[in-house]
Image (cartoon, rainbow, N blue to C red):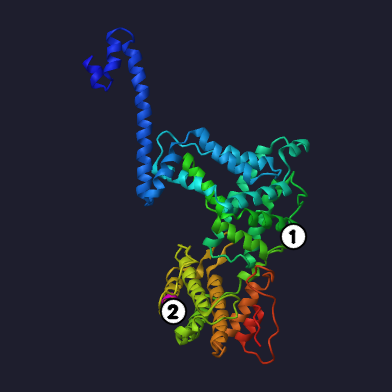
Amino acid sequence: MRSLRDLGIGLAAIRSVLHRERTVAETAAQWADALDAQIRTLRLQRAVLRAVAARGSAAEELPNMTELARLSARERRRIITDFVEDALDGVHAPAYRSGLLAAVPDLPDDPTPEQIGAWTELAALVREPELRAALRRLAEYSARTGPAAEEAHAAGETDPAGREQDAVRVAELMRLRGEEAVTAGLAPDSPAAEPVVAELVAAWLPTQAGTADPPAEDGPQARGRLLEQLETAAEPAVERYWQLLCTVTGRPAPPRWETAGTWTAAALRAHLRPYELDRSAFDGTDPDRVMLAYAEVARDVGALVAAVRPEDLGLPTPCAGWSVRQLLDHMVWENLMAASIAEDAPRGDHAADHLGDDHRAAFEDSVRAALAAFTGSGMLHRTYGPYEAPGAMIVQQVVVELLAHGWDLARATGAPTGLAPEAAEETLAAARRIYGAAPRTEGSSFAPERPAPPGAGAVDRLAAYLGRDPV
């Protein structure tokens, strides 16, 4: 009996064995079950404590975290069920509703601190009005554009699960193509983006069979519908909801969609009507001339940047909504991004501050980095992206950007706009060749072309071509 005591079995249980009221096997099974319960409790307590330590939680958060962690699977399910039913009350979207209700936050018996933290955040998130409103918007869109499960069955759709799988495959294709385009530095409103848009629309069209008024072919209706879907689905609170659910249950988190989704939506806005890509835009780019043009434009624009005083940084510019500081930050970003493409390591920090406390040094450093990358990587003689855009043309796009934004900076600060006279004419010709087919629509980088006054210089005519008012 000493062995039973060493295993932690209580004296009362040992006496029942001695008095033959219970067998050793029955007593061992009972105490093993009790230990299992204690171990689960200890594991849960450990996970809560680790989560508290990792999150830096305050003392007042402890009771709530502990209470949430101790809920049963049924109680956790009830929290999610009540949330979904309340958010979707009165919306007839059975397929969307059932998908939400099928995803339940089942914590494992031995949760990690990350899972406890995710469950705590999820329980708080479902009380937020923002998430409820976002889910309702998605459900209303689903009810408006897609048939309910019963309607799909009545229409003869025998494999709704297959259609859902197709939609998942198309979403993955969109994510892949969007990220490839960003990596290659492909502007969403450039002519080279049109074939990407056409490919994505062609893959997406079959998934619309059975929806209300499905588009039959690629065109403004189809592209407008897909754009509406992307814009409707762009709900950060809902994306966070699914990320937390996946963390709680230990499933792989869905791929992040922000980068690809933003690019694809911008490309659709710019290319609402299909057109054939004119590959002649890729031709006629002399690498040596491009480098000479870049050096001259960077020199003259750099002189403008050097003349910008701290008090000028808040001035408005012809770029709507941009101050001088924001314009300079974008110009530095253009240089850094092109350099990173040349080095096969595209940057993803577009929203970061690239100027710091010294805008002059930031611009000079970015020009040096770009020149070194352009000449040292072989970029001028390579191609990039799924449609093999010449690296020299990418550099030429940077020249166009720098010269156009140099004009913006000159107008904002009252400086002369006659920049880079030797390179300006050929840069204007390059802009017409590269962007001649680019749509001038809402969401495009270019407003409709404006007339340049008689006798206007090349940079003023470039600004007018790209939609600025040179008067």
- Quarter of the N terminus within the rendering: top left
Residue 439, image x, y percentages = 69, 69
Residue 398 image point, x, y percent: 53, 74
Earlier in the chain: of badge 1 and badge 2, it is 1
Q: Which residue is mark 1?
A: 220
Q: Nearer the viewer, residue 402 or 325?
A: 325
Residue 111 location, quadrant: top left
> Pointer 2: residues within 10 angstroms few (<14), some, or many (20+)?
many
Q: Quadrant of the C terminus?
A: bottom right
**Left/right of residue 212 with respect to residue 56 in the rendered view:** right
What amino acid is labelled 1 in the image?
Answer: Pro
| Magenta span of residues | 362-367
Q: Is residue 463 above or below residue 90?
A: below
Asked whether disc 1 touches disc 2, contact meaning CB atoms under 8 Å apart, the reply is no
- The kind of secondary structure element at disc 2 is helix
Badge 1 marks a residue whose secondary structure is helix
Residue 167 image point, x, y percent: 64, 46
Query: In the picture shown, does residue 136 fall above or below 432?
Result: above
The residue that mark 2 highlights is 359
Q: Residue at x 65, y 60 (%)?
A: 195
Residue 254 visible in the displayed image: no
Using a 10 Å C-alpha cutoff, classify the residue at mark 1 as few (fewer than 14 neighbours), some (14 to 19) or many (20 or more): some
Q: Residue furthest left?
A: 2
Which x, y percent locates residue 296? 50, 84
**Looking at numbered disc 2 in the image, what kind of residue is underneath it?**
His
Q: Main secondary structure of the magenta part?
A: helix
**Residue 425 in view (yes/no):** yes
In-front residue for pair 10/166 = 10
